[in-house]
Amino acid sequence: MKKTILTIVIIVILVVVGIILVKNMPAQKTTKTTVPKETVTPGITNPAVETPNVPVEGAKQAAPGTSFVTPKGEVVTPEGTPVKQDVLPGSPEAPKPSKSLTAEEIPAGAVQLNVTASGFTPNEFSIKAGQVVTLTVTAGDEKTHVFKFDDPSLSAVAIGIAGHETRAITFKAPSKGDYSFFCDVPGHSQRGEKGVMHVK
Ligand SMILES: [Cu+2]
């Protein structure tokens, strides 16, 4: 008789302890789920807090706003598919030009071009076929300039910059050959804003 009373008391204690444990667990979970809701402000795009989603694990951007490059060396769209370099600039599949860059944001390994009414400096550069290249174009004067390649296979690799601005674009070097580039603002290529990219 005493034994049965003792076991009943033990069972009651275990049940009470169990209820206390179960009640405490969901309390911790609810605090976690409320955090991300507060940081999202729908309908408002604030560039200062904009953090792009990494499309493929380990993918990196050369500069703020440029297309991501995967660890395998593929330049990809925000959806994670390889970019198309022969489409219209600004297409969803095209490599993305960066935001306006500060001097500190210019990637160290980038090919850096300066453009003024006197032309591009340098007006030629060499890269390797298949290499992932980040190209920056800086307006050395107060004028707007538009960097473009002549070859249709690189039509999407284009950058428009306002006066004294620097922007970057990351793309994959095409097959061997010489690819001429120019400034697409009317009158600018005629006065010498052009050059050649050598792919070796
Ligand atoms: Cu120009």
Image (tube, helix red, strand yellow):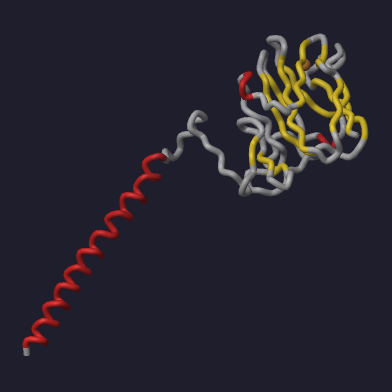
Is residue 142 left or right of 157 when viewed as pictured?
Answer: left
Q: Residue furthest front?
A: 3
Where in the image, quadrant-wise, is ligand 1 located?
A: top right
| Rendered position, 99 above or below 3 | above
Q: Residue furthest bottom?
A: 1
Is residue 135 left or right of 53 when viewed as pictured?
Answer: right
Front position in the image: 186 or 143: 143
Front position in the image: 70 or 81: 70
Image position, residue 107 (x, y; %): 67, 27
Front position in the image: 92 or 177: 177
Image position, residue 12 (x, y; %): 14, 76
Image position, residue 143 (x, y; %): 71, 12
Among the 4 quarters of the image, the one containing residue 63: top right
Q: Residue at x 83, y 16 (%)?
A: 193
Is residue 72 left or right of 11 when viewed as pictured?
Answer: right
Q: Residue furthest right?
A: 177
Among the 4 quarters of the image, the one containing residue 144: top right
Quadrant (top left, top right, bottom left, bottom right) of the N terminus: bottom left
Q: Residue at x 82, y 35 (%)?
A: 154
Quadrant (top left, top right, bottom left, bottom right) of the C terminus: top right
Image position, residue 79 (x, y; %): 63, 48
Front position in the image: 143 or 52: 52
| Rendered position, 23 above or below 189 | below
Is residue 40 left or right of 170 when viewed as pictured?
Answer: left
Q: Residue at x 88, y 33 (%)?
A: 199
Among the 4 quarters of the image, the one containing residue 169: top right
Q: Residue at x 23, y 62 (%)?
A: 23
